[in-house]
Amino acid sequence: MSRLLLGVLALQGDFAEHLQAFADIGIEAVPVKRPGEVLACDGLVIPGGESTTIGKLCERFGVGDAILELHRRGVPIWGTCAGLILLAKEIVASDQWRLGILDAEVARNAFGRQVDSFEADLPMDGIPGPPIRAVFIRAPYVTRVWGDTTILAALQDRIVAVREGNLLGTAFHPELTDDRRVQEYFVGMVEAARQAREQGQ
């Protein structure tokens, strides 16, 4: 089996930190900006940043359609912070562009402005060991889920991590700490999905 190729959407935001986080655990991750680059990936991360800006660039350059095709193929996609917003089907009080593939509603900047950024110890389903250290920066949270979406973590009754099939969403930034367990969790999703695709061929 060839090695996994993870893509990190590099249109805007903190994609460099994600690339380093995967390198720390020996996984090849590359920045992707064009539809063809996206479609070559075994897994894709949509990083934090400005969700409206990332959304406009996805639409302008056809990257959004490529991401939707990845999802149709069953390729895992992980959205962090702004990426979570773009995955969601509903965004509170906003009609901004979004991929609209995750059965969830998200509130933008729900924990406050940049000056209200904070860290917290967060237990997360599927992550063994002690709670992860979660960094929240102008973070959204999930206001409701439906369908097959499951809640993986909540902070003060606010949903901050969810999963629906091969979609993973976190309101916080695992790439900004030294703990790589969430990255390893996503890599596990990618490995399982690729094996399932290969067996189905």
Image (cartoon, grey):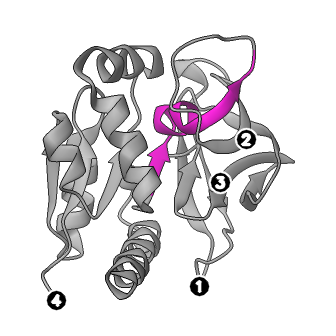
Identify the mark nearer the N-term, 4 or 3.
Answer: 4
Q: Which residues are magenta?
A: 77-92
Left of 18 or right of it: where is 82? right
Q: Which residue is mark 2?
A: 104
Q: Secondary structure at mark 3?
A: strand
Considering every residue shown, the one lying at the far right of the view is 157
Q: Give amino acid for label 1.
A: Gly
Dot 1 lies on which element?
loop
Say which amino acid is labelled 2.
Answer: Ala
- Given this view, does label 2 or label 1 mark the residue nearer the observer? 2
Up the image or down, 119 lies above or below 137; here it is below
How dense is the environment of label 3, judged by Cα within 10 Å: few (below 14), some, or many (20 and up)? many
Q: Dot 2 lies on which element?
A: strand
Residue at screen point 47% across, 74% down? 185
Identify the residue position indicated by label 3 in the image.
Answer: 161
Q: Which residue is mark 4?
A: 1
Label 1 CA crowd tier, 10 Å (few <14, some 14–19, many 20+): few
Which residue type carries mark 4?
Met
List the residue tagged with mark 1. 129
